[in-house]
Each structure stands twice: as structure tokens, then as C-alpha cells.
Image (cartoon, rainbow, N blue to C red):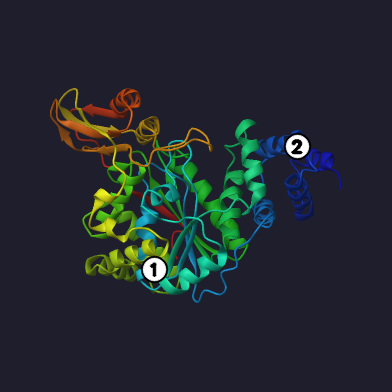
Amino acid sequence: MRMYDIILKKRDGRELTDGEIKYFIEGYTSGDIPDYQAAALLMAVFFQGLNARETAGLTMAMSRSGDRADLSAIPGIKVDKHSTGGVGDKTTLVLVPLVAAAGVPVAKMSGRGLGHTGGTVDKLESIPGFRSMLELPELIDQVRRVGAVVVAQTGHLAPADKKLYALRDVTATVDSIPLIASSVMSKKIAAGADAIVLDVKAGKGAFMQRPEDAFGLARTMVEIGNQVGRRTVALVTGMDQPLGYAVGNALEVKEAIAALKGNGPADLLELCLSLGSVMLLLAGRAGNLEEGRNILAGLLESGRALDKFEEFIAAQGGDRRITENENLLPAAGIVESLPAPRPGCVQAVHAGRIGRAAMLLGAGRENKESQIDLSVGVVLNKKAGDRVQAGEPLAVLHASDARRLEAAREVVLQAYTIGEQKPEPQPLVYGMVPEKI
């Protein structure tokens, strides 16, 4: 088998065999296939595409390129949840303890933030003492004892994806649905869950800005999951404006705690109930989505979800007192309100720009080596549909550096559109793939 022939075959629009895909992934991961040939194949895939079988084959080959987590020692159906990335998306911080409190074991491997999208691990590491690096036996033991764990994804999980993504990033081949889908699903499959719930974002703060493109990605990922024996469901959800009000690591932890206490932002609570009810259904804990939603709402109201959050945080070395004393979390030295330049009604809050402002403040990474400031970020006072008076605070900026604050201030102002009429509300959940489960 020659790499030249595989490139030629896909260049001409012909279907690759599983053996050819496996040959490519194994050779590229080991270093036997050079970057220039891998880049040529990626470009051929970008233009010619992959069918469902090829995409599933690529996904499985990448998932087998390194370590695979065996969670079979954990009783019950393990359901993983993955978001394609957004601004202010702290759903995992709420969902993990909430679903675990319902009796569904949750063993989640999460990533760190890159660019304007935040990473769950970074948020959790703003909690004093929290350990995100656990060996697999520790992870399994914690899930058996506590029912929940969130750890940083090991670099040995799907290493082929890591190499290919770096190459796609510099060869203009990122925007390919089969390549995006196989990248996401290879890591989820290697992480060992029995079922997968996907939160596919659509909007100005998402990778897929148009809902129809997000549905295309969702359908591809669901097909992959089902083809390889993982029951998979996707929700396509809105990301035109940030989720909730807080954007920034410690700030989002505070908002997640408020949600677990039952008084968090309405959109965050609604999304957690929507995703969580699917997780309960796939795990066999609920017979339908309405029953799942009612179970979760009861756990929030009773305080059992908050108790589970404290238990899981403490199990990983974190200070559980943060739920009663938020001053234990990192706090920025500079806190400044941003006044509205004129009166009117907020038409839109551009999620991507708010994410960019948080990154300028130091809450996000420009590259994987960047150091982040866990204390900084943006807290919105006004969102789409809210009326505002001239001089009234639109948002509050939390900063550690006056120069960074100055740069972020202008970007936050640019994120707001203020007009006269109240805008039509945008859907939080556009739909589900498949439509019924």
C-alpha cells in the first residue's frame, strides 16, 4: 500500500477502504508518513468529502491511535456530554453533579480553553486545591464512590487527532464536517462512554454560525456514534449571545453554583435541563424526556444537586466551602462598569466579541502555551431584549491589568447593538438529532 495511491484515489473522488484509512492514521501517528502527504490527503478530503462509512472508519482509526479508557468496572450506563464550544458555556459544571445526583454515573474528560471558547478544566482549576489530573484507577474509584468525576483529557487519548488537527489548522482544512466530526467523536469514543450527548452550538460565538450547518455536523456525529455502537443524540443550541451572564473562569464557577442553588440564569438552567433529560433517558434512568426533566428539577429544588457538586469537588481536592463563600475563588484587582453610550433596547450581544474581550483580559489562550488569569472576565448586565438607559451599566469588566482592560473595553462596546425596537427572541434549542428518541 502506498500513500501516493490513497491520495490519488481520494483526489479523484473515490471511496477509501477501512484498511487504507487505518494505514494512513497509523503511518502518520508513527511519523512514517510526512506532513506534506497528510496535508495533500486532508485537502482531497476537504474537496471530495467522506461518506458515512469512511467518516466512521476515520473516527475509529483515530480513537485507536492511543490510550482508550475502559470504564466497564463502573456499574451502569455511562453517558458523556460534549459541547462544540461557546462563550459562557458552563453547563458541564452544573450537569455533572445534577445528573450524578439522579443516579447516573458521569466520568467526563474535558479540555482546556483555546481562543474565545472557555475550557471546563480551566474553570474547575479556579477552585482552590482542585485536581484535574487523575490516573484511570483513581477516576474509576471516584465514580464508584461519588458518581462523578471531571478530569483533564490525557495527551495519549487519540493522539492522531492531535497531530491532524494541528496540520488542519495551518493548511486551511479545518472547515470540513467529516473532519470536524471525526475529530470530536474519536476523543469521545476513546474516553469510554456507552452513550454520548452532543451540544452543537450555532451562532456568532460558535464554530458553525448557521443553524443548518450545525445540524449537518450534528447529523454526521450522530451517524458516527450509532455506527460504532455508541447511542448518540445531539441538540443544536444557540450561541449568538453568551450563555448566562458570566464569561471567565472563576466568574463562571460562581454562576454555576447559583444555578445549582436554583437561582441561576434562566437560559443556563433551561439548557442544563434539556441536555440532562436526554442523558437520563439514554442511561435508562427516565422513561421519557419529560420525566427526566422533572427528576432533575426536583434535585435542584431539594439541594441534592448542590450537595453532589460539593462532594465531587471535595473528592478531587477542591475546597467545598466555595458554595457558601465565593471569596475563596480568585478575584480580579480591577472591577469596572461599562456604561451604555445611549438609551434604547439591546438588539444583540455578539457572543464572539464578548469571548474575545474575555481573552484580551487574560481569561483565554491565544495558543496552547499561553498562561491564563483565572480571575478575570466579563459579567453582562444586559442581554438581548433588555432596555437600557444612557450611562446605565451594560457589563462589568474584571481585570488584573489596566492595559488589558482598555483593549477589552472597546471590544465589549462593539459587541452590543442598541436600537429602538425589542428584537425577536432567538431559540435556545433549535432542535434535536434524531428528532425523537
The quarter of the picture where residue 277 lies is bottom left
Q: Is residue 151 left or right of residue 333?
A: right
In front here: 166 or 274?
166
| Label 1 packing within 10 angstroms: few (<14), some (14-19), many (20+) | many
- Residue 96 appears at what percent x and percent y? 39, 61
Q: Check the image and name the residue furthest to the bottom.
A: 75
Q: Amino acid at mark 1?
A: Ala
Name the secondary structure under disc 2: helix
Residue 51 appears anywhere in the view: no
Residue 198 x/y as whole percent: 47, 55
List the residue tagged with mark 2. 11
Residue 49 position in % (x across, y down): 66, 42
- What residue sits 44% from the left and 39% below the top? 210
What element does badge 1 sit on? Answer: helix
**Front in this rendered view, residue 390 or 319:** 319
Q: Which one is earlier in the sequence, the residue at label 2 or at label 1?
A: 2
Mark number for residue 377?
Answer: none
- Residue 346 visible? The answer is yes
Residue matched to label 1: 100
Instruction: Name the residue located 27 percent from the left edge and 28 percent from the top edge.
Output: 417
Closest to the camera, between mark 2 and mark 1, is 1
